[in-house]
Amino acid sequence: MKLVLTASGSWRRGKPIALKPTLDVAVANSPSVERVVVLEREGLPEVEMLEGRDISWADFLEAGKGVDGSAAAETNSEDVWMLAYTSGTTGRPKGAVHVHGGFLVKIASEAAYALDVRAGDRFQWITDMGWIMGPLTMVGAHSLGAAMVMLEGSPDFPEPDRVWATAERHEVAVLGISPTLIRALIPKGDQWPERHQLNKLRILGSTGEPWNPDPYRWLAHEVGRDRVPIINISGGTEVGACFLAPYPVEPLKACSLGGAALGMAVEVFDPAGNSIRGQVGELVCTKPWPGMTRGVWGDRERYLESYWSTYPGVWRHGDWAKIDADGEWFLLGRSDEAINVAGKRLGPAEVESVLVSQPAVAEAATVGVPDATKGESVWCFWVPTDVAGDDVSEQLRELVAEQLGRPFKPGRVIRVEALPRTRSAKILRRAVRALAIGEDPGDMSSAENPESLDAIRLALASDSQVG
C-alpha cells in the first residue's frame, strides 16, 4: 500500500501553518496514493478528512494493534530506499534515487568518522526533512546509537538564541548549522550564544553553501569557544554522501573543507579536463561510490545531462573548487553561477565575502548580468544588519573594486529587505538573477520567503545606479 503520513498543521513564528490542504492538492495529482494518515495537532483547526482515504493517527495505531510488526521486510542492496528531491536552486527539482545498500552505509560511515557521532550523543542539524541533511541526521544518529534532536518552527523565534538554548537544554554534542543562518544571527548580537553553557558541544557541522571568513570565525569563537572544530562538509542530495570532509583530528584553515572524504576520488578540473592546483575549477569525482544516486526519477536523460555530459566518464557536480598550496580544499559557489567579466571568471562567494566583511551587511547575493562591453557585469544585492542604518551601497562598490580589482567593480549594488532562500537556507541566486535581467524567476516551490522577490523588484525599479 502507498500511503502518506502528515500532520494537520504546524507553527512558524507563532503562526499556525496548515499542511493538510496543501497535501490534498498534491495527492489529487498522485493517484497511486491509497491512504493518508493525519496526526491532528492540538491548538490547530480540525481538518477535512476524505472518507475512504484519510485516517487519523489514533485510528491508524488502533488498526495496527495485534499485528506482528517485528519482522523486517527483506530488501536487496539495490532496492529503492528514498527519492530525495533537490531544492531547485538551479532549476526544476530533481528526484535523486537512493538505495538501501548505498546511502545508508555511506552516511553511517561519514557520521562516524567526519562528524564523530557516538553512541549516546545528541545529534542535531538545523534543517528540515525536505533537505538531504534531514535524512543524513536521521540515518547518522540512529545507525550509531545517538539521539536525533529536532526543532519545530524557525531557529530564531521567539528569541535569537533558540538554537543555542536548545543545544544547552538537550546537551547536544554534534550541531549542524548553515552559513546563511549564522550570517543572519550575527547581527542579533554576541550576547545570545554567550548566555548559554555549551560545554557538551563537541562538533560543529556545516554545509549547504560556501563560507565567508568572518562568519566562520564568529561561529568558531562565539559558539565553539575556540575549542570545537567546524566540520565543513560538502556533498549533495544526489551524492548521498560527502565529496569533501575534514576530520576532527586535523588542523584546518578558516572556511576549509579539508580534503577528500573517505573513498571519494575527487579532483579539480579545468575546462579541458586536466587536474589543476591553486586555480579555481570544476569539482569532479572520477570513480563511483556507494552512496551515489542511481538516477533521476523518471528522467534518465536529465541525469546523464546533469552529471555526465561535461567530462566523459567523470561526474561533474557543478561547484567551483580550489585546492591551495597546502592541499586544503575550498568551495567558491556553483559553477553555473560563475560570472565572466571580460574573460575573467569570478565566483559569487568571492564578492559576497567582501560585502559581508562590512559591518552594515548581514548577508548578500552576487549575480552576473549581460553587459555589451564586458560580457557580464557584477550586480550585488545586500541585506542590512540594521534596517534604520545608512545605505552603504556606494561604499560597497568601492570595497569590491579595492579588494578584487577594478575590472570587478559592481555595476549595481542594491540594498534589499531580504533575499529569497530555500527552506534549507540556500540563497536562490537563480531567482535574483532572473529579476535583475527582467525574466520570470520560474519555479519558486522551494522558497521559504517568495514574497522577498516583490521587494527586490521594487528595489530594482527605484535604484538609480549606472554600471
Image: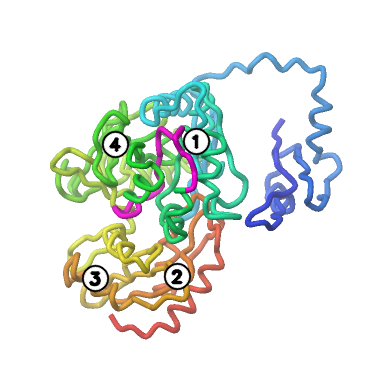
According to the picture, the residue beneath numbered tag 3 turns out to be 399
Q: What residue lies at 26% left-to-right and 39% top-to-bottom?
A: 312
Q: Mark 1 or mark 2, which has the lower sequence index?
A: 1
Whether the residues at callouts 4 and 1 have beta carbons within 8 Å, the answer is no
**Front position among marks 1 and 2:** 2
**Front position among marks 4 and 2:** 2
Q: Secondary structure at mark 3?
A: helix
**Front position among marks 3 and 1:** 3
Q: Residues within 10 Å of mark 3 (few under 14, many from 20)?
A: many
| In the image: residue 198, left or right of residue 331 | right
Numbered circle sitting on residue 386: 2
Q: Residues within 10 Å of mark 2 (few under 14, many from 20)?
A: few
Q: Is residue 425 magenta?
A: no
**Front position among marks 3 and 4:** 3
Q: Is residue 384 above or below residue 248?
A: below
Q: Amino acid at mark 1?
A: Val
Instruction: Tell me where residue 1 appears, x and y as whole percent.
Output: 72, 30
Q: Nearer the viewer, residue 95 or 190?
A: 190
Q: Amino acid at mark 3?
A: Leu
| In the image: residue 393, left or right of residue 146 | left
**Front position among marks 2 and 3:** 2
Whether the residues at callouts 3 and 4 have beta carbons within 8 Å, the answer is no
Q: Is residue 371 above or below residue 169?
A: below
Numbered circle sitting on residue 285: 4
Residue 132 seen by the camera? no
Alpha-carbon distance for marks 2 and 3? 20 Å
Q: Amino acid at mark 4?
A: Cys
Alpha-carbon distance for marks 3 and 1? 44 Å
Alpha-carbon distance for marks 1 and 2? 43 Å
Q: Nearer the viewer, residue 200 or 456?
A: 200
Q: Mark 3 or mark 4, which has the lower sequence index?
A: 4
According to the picture, the residue beneath numbered tag 1 turns out to be 97
